[in-house]
Image (spheres, rainbow, N blue to C red):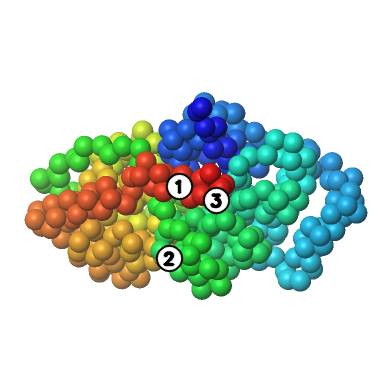
Amino acid sequence: MTPRPLTIAYLYTTFPKATETFMQREVIALRARGVDLRIYSLFGGGGTFAGVAVTRFSMWRLLELVWVIPKVALTRWDVFGVILHGLLKRRPPSWLNFWENMLGAGFAGLWYPEFRRDPPDLIHAAWGGAPATAAWTLHKLNGHPYSAAAHAYDLYEHGGDWWLYEKLAEAKFIHTSTRMGADTLTGRGLAPDRIHVIRRGLDSFPPLKPLRRARTPLRLVSVARLVAKKGLRHQLRIYAAARAAGVAFEARIVGEGPLRAELEALARSLGLESTVRFLGHCDQARVWSEFAWADVLVHTGIVAPSGDRDGLPNVIPEAMTAGTLVITSPVAATGEAIHDGETGLVADVDDPAAWIAAFQRIASDEGLAARLQRAARAWVEVEYDAHRNAERLHGLLAEAAGR
């Protein structure tokens, strides 16, 4: 008799999302292992993906909470009281995080009858915000086993998610994609044996491109959302200093975001109009063509005033896979992939001279460039294989579901 496939309710904030291709690869890899995925998108997204219908939560349904909340308060005070206590005992770190948690709780309050009628083997929250709140609340209401992920945004934005500890404390396991994240979770009192570092990954590895023999002018690319944590103001000032030092280069910035107008104005004020191009949002095919064009991926990540920072941006291992060399700032978990002088180069964003020296080394030292490229590719083939990493995640999901 053929065993019934593992059924997982996967909760996302928004799915599919153009800037979160790593989430899409995870779904594809789990589907390839026969997992029956029920995908719920709490805000945005919807449609179908990889042959799976994506159930998009309608915000209009939140109006039903007018009568659902009194019902839950009267019949399930054991759950409602916990949520009410959480609301009263401390202030949320931001209004956005408050509403993220309320969205997750609202989803659970409205969907728990459906989950009770047709329960999955396990609920998995892909993020520690609204999805984890929904999974935790569904667990409280129906007893569903659940697991959850916690990544850099959940851990660091405004000091971290409002209810993160409570939500993760009862999860069967916790998925994070960096050792930095695991250390932070352990430091907050969560049991280390339930925290698993499983990186994202690529479905396949393209052929390693040859290095350009004459890397002058040096071709630089940055792929990033135009937000504070990407350090793009620093990046433009580094480019201005490099030009003043006589370094020949061309730079492209791929990405969109709220800082675009400000960054374009800064580029003009620094006289970089003819040297730096802003390409806006590009699809994945175009991003890979930019990797093919570029000699170097430039990553100038910083800790934003809100506390937000990158974990290990997926663009770094993607560039390493393609054979594009990487220069990065030593912030967050970038050092887990880029070991200075081994798999890439590291320079502080407040030290333009260090960046200039790194540009010059890559442009002129053929042996160094070749060693960095080979070692970077070797790292991603071990650490960034989506199928190998999905196999680990699948095993944890099955174990958590009692399968």
Residue beneath disc 3: 400
The answer to whether the residues at label 2 and label 3 have Cβ atoms under 8 Å apart is no
Front-lying residue, 67 or 46 = 67
Rendered view: 390 above or below 90: above
In whole angstroms, how far apart are the C-alphas of marks 1 and 2? 23 Å
The answer to whether the residues at label 1 and label 3 have Cβ atoms under 8 Å apart is no
Q: Quadrant of residue 294?
A: top left
At 31% across and 37% down in the image, what residue appears?
204
State the image coordinates of residue 69 (x, y, percent, origin top left). Answer: 86, 50
Residue beneath disc 1: 395
Rendered view: 146 above or below 179: above
Residue beneath disc 2: 180
What amino acid type is highlighted by mark number 2?
Answer: Met
Front-lying residue, 89 or 329 = 89
State the image coordinates of residue 317 (x, y, percent, origin top left). Answer: 32, 50
What amino acid type is highlighted by mark number 3?
Answer: Ala
